[in-house]
Amino acid sequence: MGLAYLLLLLFGLFGLHRLYLGRSLSGAGMAAITVLSIPLIWSGLGLLGFVATGTWALADAVLIPSMARETNDPVALLA
């Protein structure tokens, strides 16, 4: 869980913490939104993309413990 928080702190907008926790589709989605927002930063779309992924990353700060628990608990994966 500590590494997930470190990845969130350093690369939160790129979704690396989600990739680490096995959430590859949503992690790739965060990375795609961030990368597409970089060239559009001066328009409203780029700013909107950064606000979206920033809000998503802040929400993940609260959700990381439950995501880590689900990733590390093999019984939860079967349910």
Image (cartoon, rainbow, N blue to C red):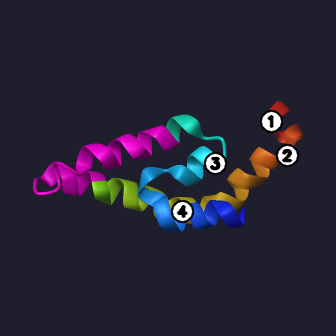
What is the secondary structure assignment of the residue under circle 1?
helix
Could you say which disc has been placed on residue 20 in the image?
3
Along the line of sight, which residue is nearer the eye, 48 or 6? 6
Q: Residue 48 appears in which quarter of the rendering?
A: bottom left
Disc 3 marks a residue whose amino acid type is Tyr
Along the line of sight, which residue is nearer the eye, 72 or 75? 72
Dots 2 and 4: beta carbons under 8 Å? no
Q: Mark 3 or mark 2: which comes first in sequence?
A: 3
For label 4, the residue is: 8
Residue 47: give x, y in percent of width and height. Answer: 21, 57
Identify the main secondary structure in magenta: helix
Q: Quick one: which residue is furthest to the left in this view?
A: 43
Q: Mark 2 or mark 4: which comes first in sequence?
A: 4
For label 1, the residue is: 77
For label 2, the residue is: 73
Crowding at label 2, few (<14), some or many (≥20) Cα neighbours within 10 Å? Answer: few
Dots 3 and 4: beta carbons under 8 Å? no
Q: Quick one: which residue is furthest to the top in this view?
A: 78
What is the secondary structure assignment of the residue under circle 3?
helix
What is the secondary structure assignment of the residue under circle 4?
helix
Q: Which residues are magenta?
A: 27-49
